[in-house]
Amino acid sequence: MSSTRTALVTGATAGIGHSFAQHLARRGHDLVLVARDASRLEAVAAELSAAHGVQVEVLRADLADRAQLATVEARLADPARPVELLVNNAGFGLKERFLDNSADTETEMLEVLVTAVLRLTHAALGPMAERGHGGVINVSSVAAFLPRGTYSAAKAWVNSFSEWAAHEYRPQGVTVMSLCPGFTKTEFHERMHVGRDSAPEFLWLDVDFLVSKALSDYDKGRVYSIPGAQYKAITTLTRLVPSRALQGLQSLGRK
């Protein structure tokens, strides 16, 4: 694989992760794709390799499992096969409210949304800082700006962590960006058994628009990417509206 043009994408077989893989392949990046479904991984790898002439490696891993997560960490830390860009995209949401989920289910979500992001970023940043170039895109959410339970709390952590890392490692040539999508037309909500009517139509973003804007913001060295004028307005308003009022939005995207 190329020494400076390899990107590793988690959750790469569907939705935002798949779109990232497509866009990066078009840019000429070789790829390391991570997901839980081996057959879908192989199919996506074959598709991208044939369409764009890039080399594609696959790693089947459930990031909630520390042993499987460790295999991805080892790949990122391998000095003989440098990764230039890490896209921490893997994740899932829970439709039910906090007490309607088991503590184990909530913990599994935090393992993927927080622990995996921390450990994979840690594994990637060392070699990148030593080389003096590289980058990380952490897929967060507009939910990070709203009081919406543990999912929002996890994404708020991703934002805080990414903002700190962006400033900490920029002098060493590393770009870190937090991408904050709103409602996006992918499988994400389908897997939660949530319909498209759970939010107004104007809030739904096209996934390719989202990823194109994210990569443009990353190229510009931005710390945050919030695609869509509607979501820029919403995140600005969250700084002005009291949290108690924002609490009333709990049902949005859960029907």
Image (cartoon, rainbow, N blue to C red):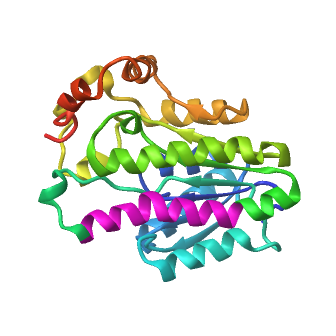
Residue 142: image x %, image y %? 40, 34
Residue 222: image x %, image y %? 67, 31
Q: Nearer the viewer, residue 187 or 176?
A: 176
Q: Is residue 161 magenta?
A: no
Residue 55 visible in the picture: no
Q: Quadrant of residue 49?
A: bottom right
Q: Residue at x 76, y 64 (%)?
A: 126
Indicate whether 137 appears above or below 105. above
Q: Quadrant of residue 221?
A: top right
Q: Residue at x 40, y 56 (%)?
A: 91
Q: Which residues are magenta?
A: 104-124
Quadrant for the C terminus in the image: top left
Quadrant for the N terminus in the image: bottom right
Residue 218: image x %, image y %? 67, 36
Residue 46: image x %, image y %? 56, 63
**In the displayed structure image, the side of residue 248 where residue 186 appears, left or right:** right
